[in-house]
Amino acid sequence: MMFKPGAWCFPDPAPFVQSCCTLGFACLKDTGSLFGHSCQQLQDSKLNYTFASSYGECKNKVAPGDQCGARRAARGGVAAGASGGAWYRRGGGGRAPQRLPAGVVGCGGGGQCIKWNTCANTGPWVNFCCPDGFSCQPGSQDYRVWTCSADVTAGPPVDDAAELLQYPPRKLPEGSCTCRTDANEERVPTACPSPWSTPAGTDQVATPIKVGKKGRFYSTETGQDVVLHGVNWYGWSVGQFNFDGLWAFCDDNFTASTPPCQQDGEIPPHYPYPAIGAAGIQRLGGIRFWGKRTMTNDFATVIYRMKLLGFNSVRIPFSFADLNKDIPPPSTGKTEFFPCMIDPDSTIAWGKTIDPALAKLVADQGLTGKFDFPRYTGPQHPPPKVKGSPQCNLPWSAPFTPSYRGGQGQLNLTMCNWYLPQGPNVPAIQRLLWQVQYVVSQGMYAVLTFSSARDPEPNVASPQLFTRNWQNLWRMLADLPQYKHMKGRVLADLATDPSRWGCQVREFARAAGAPAGSQWDKTCAPAGASGPACAPGAWLYASAASAIHAVDGDVPVLIEGMGQDQQRGKFASCASGYFPGLKWGDGFITNGPTVSRYNLSNPSGMFAYEEFKKIGPFAINKAAMPNQASAGRHNTPAASPLCTAPAETCPRASVVVSPHLYPASITGVPAETEDQDDEITWKWDISWGWKSLGLDKTSKGEALRDVGLLIGEFGAADGGDNGVANADTTSYSARDAKWLKLLSRYLNGLSWQNGPASWMWWSWNANSGDTKGIVGPLTTWREVQWTKIRMLTREFGLVPWYCKYVSSEFCETVTWQ
């Protein structure tokens, strides 16, 4: 990979072939550059002129920036850009004009123009040559003067062109949303609404946040601490082109359905005897509904349920590979775009999103309906009528027949997800941008996290590609009309579980097939691979963060651990050591004795004051502390001086460590003695706990910069059967329950010293294999798994709606085991 002149580069030994810079340039020290180095032009004496071209012989060596050609002749046969036969040397900083050498005639003076073989056109001069890495190019917009200019290519290498996220994104075609489906299940197009054109508007957006003193999130409006209690919701990272589960349904009034459903009577039957009769079906234009409903199948309504449960943020794993693609057509029966039954707010809140134990208490006291609750503020259901579109304006309701519920009431349908872009030629990025905006408009924070199942992953192999993709994504966000309401509410998590990827540099990979594990401080490749494999992880992170901050300097950037966890077999030669019990996104250990004992990849340069000033995006102007002895095992290190001024005046710490925490039941790699709590908490101490308090040191004993903390993922193995049961099926082992309580106590201990800790539970998805989801079963994604909500409420500070509106005492005393 070659970098442009003036671009940041890596000093020797470089992780790439030969050089990071184009020919004629070298990677030299530059205090203003991202990595302390940039591609700078070689001195004239060190330039090479191999000159293999059709320009004739290399009789006249032209220095970079000097004139090598001109446009067609001016009056009197003088080359344009020259005066009286003189020509200008433009690269020498004030050099006097020089006449053409004897025997050499410029274009217009009888010489030959090489490019078009005639002096009537513009081009280089015969027998003039530029040094290697430069060519004769027009030097101004009107092509009056041609000079020796550097040969560079814009963007990543050709191999990565298809991987580069296109900026600006392609626009949405007309009619990219769907007001309903017809009797043949074909979509009826309509215009897409703005995600801000809802009752919420911009009034509900959360306070914007930064990372301030001691690494805590704080409000830029009030200066108060802000805590994120979020949930992971994947789908965009696994080829769904949407959040997963919106397609889920179980036609529980059709006994022949597969998989089988429990018939609880919540969905009115449609076959073979429709609850609205043949007349009702005709009234609705032959529309079909298969047991789908807004509370589980409609994106905006699922966000409403998340808010009801107390979550104020959503972590969104995605893959760059899919964002350039068009959204594929939905498959019949498994689509998230389908007519569905409208669930009233009261049904969602009081019927399905309140702890059943509390609901019973309220009912026993005769207080049902006596309490207020938060209302849905998303896109309207059914969709608005469309002028001039008879199909869009067909009715959405029909009365029940006398044989169903005695003819009382009516069936109320809508079009689930009608407001989301879909249809032919719709770029996937446009749907994701809509959804991110909507999450923010509803008062929640969005955490975008790059995640990919590909291995090797081109973005990890190429710092330039990784950097430009993150920057292009943030440019798209910043270009949105309402970005001022998104600023400080969208966070970037640069890479999910980076140690799991193989890594290739294309110059070697084709021949060697060289995978490598991502390491903090070094390149690595398995035994037998020739040459380096990839840039150190700290460089990948720093370059991507710098690119994001070039668009918006206040974006909180999250980084995950790498290179210290137990690698897969093919990485063994890359990571000869690992720390017991670390897995996936954990691994920030800088403690010197521990790094040495286990031969760990060392991230000290990522966090040290002096080292990190060289890589720009996280730089703060504070001198390194004097060397101090590294802390010994189980000894809390001495505190580093901390900024005690108001948060907004402290040095900005824009980086947040975001470990992923799971017990051995999921990772399969226990700590040295998993049953001893101090072994587990020691692992957390030296990896990220001390860093979040500003108490840790580098491997050399230097003070670390302040960093934020957000637990990006955590969960435990759920042994329940959530296949079809419309119930809470959560089942934790005694060992995992103990682990969850231990983590709770540990985070509370950090909170006493540094304010409440932020976290993201894994996950919302019912189809999350080990942990299962906040909702279940697999058939409907409808039933809240109350054991998990009670645990998060009691142990980790989650505050569901009913804790505020109904009974705080219940939430303070509810048990989950």
Image: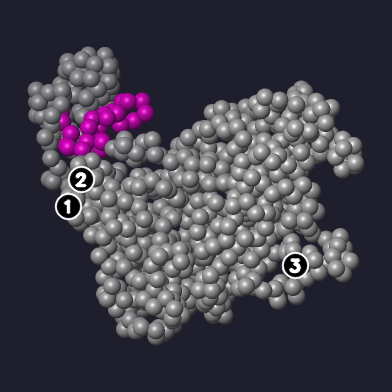
- Find out whether the residues at labels 2 and 1 contact each other: C-beta distance under 8 Å: yes
Check disc 3 and report the residue beneath it: 357
Q: Residues within 10 Å of mark 1 (few under 14, many from 20)?
A: few
Q: Which residues are magenta?
A: 128-151
Q: Kindly indicate the quadrant of the structure image that contains residue 601.
A: bottom left
Q: How far is disc 2 from disc 3 in space, using C-alphas?
A: 61 Å
The number of callouts visible is: 3
Check disc 1 and report the residue beneath it: 528
- Work out which residue is located at the far front of the displayed protein and give it: 256
Which mark is first along the chain, 3 or 2? 3
Pinpoint residue 703: horizontal percent, then vertical percent. 38, 76
* Secondary structure type for disc 2: helix
Q: How far is disc 3 from disc 1 in space, using C-alphas?
A: 61 Å
Of 178 and 54, nearer the camera is 178
Amino acid type at mark 1? Gly
- The question of residue 656 being in magenta is answered with no
Frontmost of labels 2 and 3 is: 3
Which mark is first along the chain, 1 or 3? 3
Q: Residue drawn at (19%, 55%), measured in percent from left and top?
A: 527
Q: Residues within 10 Å of mark 3 (few under 14, many from 20)?
A: few
- The question of residue 147 being in magenta is answered with yes
Q: Residue drawn at (13%, 29%), measured in percent from left and top?
A: 52
Amino acid type at mark 2? Ala
Check disc 2 and report the residue beneath it: 512
**Disc number for residue 78:** none
